[in-house]
Image: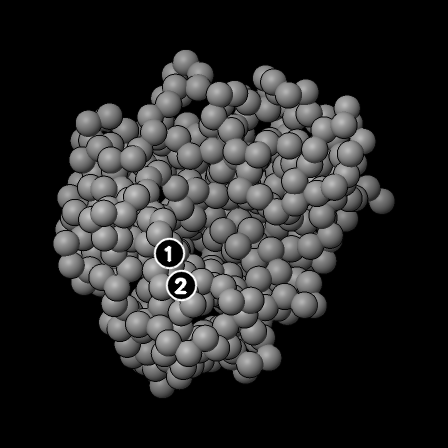
Amino acid sequence: MKFSAIVFFSVMILLSCEQPKPLAYQSKGKVDFPVTSEDELMLDSIQRVTFRFFMEEHHPDWGIVKDRASEWAPSSIASTGFAIPCFAIGAERNWISRQEAAQIVLNMLNFFINSEQSTDSLAAGYKGFYYHFLRMDTGQREWKCELSSIDTGLLMMGIIFARNYFNADNETEKQIRQLAGQLLGRMEWNFLEMPADSPHPYTISMGWKPEESMLNWGWTGYNEALFLYVLAAGTGMENVERSYNSWLSTYKWKTPYEGYSHVAFPPLFGHQFSQAFIDYRGLVDSYMKEKGLDYFENSRRATYVQRLYAMENPHGWVGYDSLCWGVTASDGPTKIYNFDDKKFLGYAGRGTAGPDYNYFDDGTIAPYGALSSLPFAPEIVIPTARYFIEVHGDSIWGKYGFLDAFNMTAKWVNNDYIGIDQGPMMIMIENFRTGLIWNYVMKDPVIQDGLKKLGYEYLN
């Protein structure tokens, strides 16, 4: 039996359960994309198998989710943040009960509210922020990693979703809402504001370590931290407008191909992480208003640029074409040298915004890179998803769906799954299908206040 037939058969069984009614795909000023029944079956299958990662890789008592599927892996607070909407998706699609999803999320929030916040090197966090990685056995800091602003931010975005989605009048969901408010309310943002004489004055620092103090590198635009400034503004960061203007001042406007001018950031994840939670369709700040472009269209263009780059394939990597694209952060072949002595990297923030603006492109494709762009450009993502399954499914699909990455030049396939790949992919598929995460996050006062403080408006 061919792989595609196996997927189709399995998804027919899954669809025997009641499913949420899809919403029409809407993007302000764009034509709706017609989704066929076969497309829906494929997307449902991808989501259902991806969901297993979060069900099987979370702590049974604390709810926190592993960074990756490997046995040795610690928890990632970003993976945990992405997991929260994934449990809700599971409840909406009747893969688990709402009660089970709510209890897992409540366990998470209890863990974070009760974990140690101090300057101790083994604490879970400090000043309302959390360390990037936490041990699965003790809940303490792992690998002397940084107190991470971006990863804490992703955790908090999941928590914002939770306090709006879990709105029932029962004790479990009431506790979720109460604890979510406490966690959001104790973030001390100005602790991480870069000083005036730093390389990136007034921006939000990437993090802090008890051994070194604040990291001397700030979040400058444009990248995955777009949401971070909205979150900071909505949760009380002082002088946040000054910080945001510093962020905007470092944007890079590129025209890699005619008709595809956009604010560039080569790795696709930088366009996806913020929009997994915030619905940027039609939204512009002062910079984007001047360009006459909303952030959603910006990401749509970045997605198309990746496909055009793969079709052009300036470095001659095996497999790149109109159906095989998606260069973004992932594992890589590392020390394999079997193609003209070319060097391949391990884990890297790969990306491309055209032939003249690349990060570490070594022929490695991450399936989640294309799939997480589904809302932006379904007309090119859906054929690529089908290609991945039907042509490469036997090698790049496994227990939790799409494996992290593959490289046809190096004849290499990763054998692992990464939480910050699985989460955005599952969430963005759901946003495309029903708008679930966008609908609940956008109504939160933190998001609305943050957008207002930063001067966002809807483009006419």
Instruction: Note whether 154 is above or below 242 in the view shown.
Output: below
Circle 2 or circle 1, nearest the eye: 2
Rendered image: mark on residue 315 = none
Q: Is residue 346 left or right of residue 94?
A: right
Of 178 and 439, nearer the camera is: 178
Q: Percent position (x, y) of residue 381?
A: 54, 34
Residue 1 in view: yes
Of 56 and 202, nearer the camera is: 202
Please name the residue that numbered disc 1 is placed on: 215
Q: Name which residue type carries label 2.
A: Glu
Residues marked 2 and 1 touching at CB (< 8 Å)? yes
Please name the residue that numbered disc 2 is placed on: 212
**SS at mark 2?**
loop
Q: Residue at x 47, y 48 (%)?
A: 428
Q: Quadrant of residue 176?
A: bottom left
Dividing the image into 4 quarters, which one contains the C terminus?
Answer: top left
User: Mark 2 and mark 1: span between their CA atoms?
Assistant: 7 Å
Q: Percent position (x, y) of residue 79?
A: 51, 61
Q: Residue at x 59, y 68 (%)?
A: 74
What is the crowding at mark 1: few (fewer than 14 residues within 10 Å), some, or many (at least 20)?
Answer: some
Q: Percent position (x, y) of residue 267?
A: 49, 37
Q: Quadrant of residue 457?
A: top left
Residue 371 in view: no
Which residue occupies the extreme top position in the image? 258
Instruction: Note whether 65 is above or below 312 in the view shown.
Output: below
Q: Residue at x 53, y 54 (%)?
A: 420
Q: Residue at x 14, y 54 (%)?
A: 239
Q: Name which residue type carries label 1.
A: Leu
What is the crowding at mark 2: few (fewer than 14 residues within 10 Å), some, or many (at least 20)?
Answer: few
Of 237 and 9, nearer the camera is: 237
Q: Percent position (x, y) of residue 298?
A: 36, 31
**SS at mark 1?**
loop
